[in-house]
Amino acid sequence: MFFTFRMLNYFVEDFKRKNNVDITRNPRSLRRLKTACEKAKRMLSFKLVTTIEIDYLCEGIDFSSSITRVKFEEINMDLFNECIKTVESCFNDSKIEKSSVDDIVLVGGSSRIPKVQELLSDFFDGKDLCKNINPDEAVASGAAVQAALLGTTDFKNVPNLALRDVTPLSLGILVKGDIMSVVIPRNTSVPVKTTQRLSFMRVCFTIDDNGILTVSAKEKSTGNTNEITITNDKERLSADEIKKLIQEAEEYRAEDEKFLRKAKVMNELDDCIYKLRNALKNKDVALKLSSQKVENINNAITVATNLLDRNNQQSEVEVLEDHLKELKSMLEDLVFKTKLVSFFSN
């Protein structure tokens, strides 16, 4: 579709240049030209040049123009490259080597475009493409194989394959500093169940075979629990929204890494504050500390809390790291003096 629209724009400009008429204001003329472009696109898969001829295209003007395969490839080259980037992304996500691929099956009518096939073959280091399956029927053939595998009938010619769905995006929880603590990484096979322990709660993510996500949380101090279920028909991102999120993540990767470093320090600092406050409330710990030591810890907690409560941009990461080192040192000292290792590890 995108390739057709590129060709359509090319001929719209060609018609405008030759006749000083903009056919984009005439929906009927635009539809006729688009139909001709679709046919021309298919012809260029077998010919080096093709011609579009339309009588009375717009305002009684006949239109005849040619386009070469080279020109078609030129106006679509960025789209062709995006196709290959998608294939490359699949290998990066799946951690599979190109050399382990047995056959390269073409799917969809646009896979007949010679340039697409050329770039795909080059990506696989010159490996021949599998062309004994009709690209228009490849998806249906795969669905038939999957249906046979899921069914109860024993088909001798059906390969023993396992098709596993994966999560399109990483799933996690929002923690201090407006960052996400990943619980289930992107491209994890489902069904899956993962639990993450935070300083004050345990969070469990579960995705079943139907892609239904259930998130439960239990607060350690009170034992209170809560749960939410997100099904396929609500509160889910569309395919376009998922693609947009991934693209934005790539664009702002450097900025995100800088922000992530600071956010991680803030979360560690918050965790140390939580553990030190709980320690001072414990009688076994308090009895082994001098009043001066307790005061020093409380002062350090107050300073660190003020840093976290201020605007994130005003607290430099180096300052946060210095206070984190100070609080960690105090925490280690408490563990050494009280010998309550299990208490501080929870």
Image (cartoon, rainbow, N blue to C red):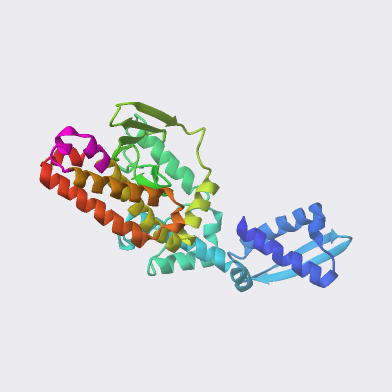
Above-or-below relation of 337 to 11: above
Horizontal placement of 154 versus 345: left or right?
right
- Nearer to the camera, 193 or 177: 177
Q: Residue 307: x percent and y percent? A: 39, 52
Chief secondary structure of the magenta portion: helix
Residue sticking out furthest to the right: 60
- Residue at 73% x, 66% y: name it: 11
Q: Residue 112: x percent and y percent? A: 53, 60
Residue sticking out furthest to the front: 292
Within the magenta stretch, is there residue 280? yes
Horizontal placement of 300 versus 134: left or right?
left
- Residue at 81% x, 60% y: name it: 23
In this rendering, does residue 131 appear at all? no
Q: Can you say which quadrant of the picture contains the C terminus?
A: top left
Q: Quadrant of residue 262?
A: bottom left
Q: Quadrant of residue 71?
A: bottom right
Within the magenta stretch, is there residue 9? no
Q: Residue 111: x percent and y percent? A: 52, 58
Q: Specify start and end residues of the magenta stretch as a single range.
A: 276-290
- Nearer to the camera, 50 or 97: 97
Horizontal placement of 100 versus 282: left or right?
right
In this rendering, does residue 211 appear at all? yes
Q: Can you say which quadrant of the picture contains the N terminus?
A: bottom right
- Residue at 20% x, 46% y: name it: 292
- Residue at 87% x, 64% y: name it: 61
Q: Residue 267: x percent and y percent? A: 34, 49
Above-or-below relation of 336 to 252: above
Q: How many marks?
A: 0
- Nearer to the camera, 31 or 319: 319
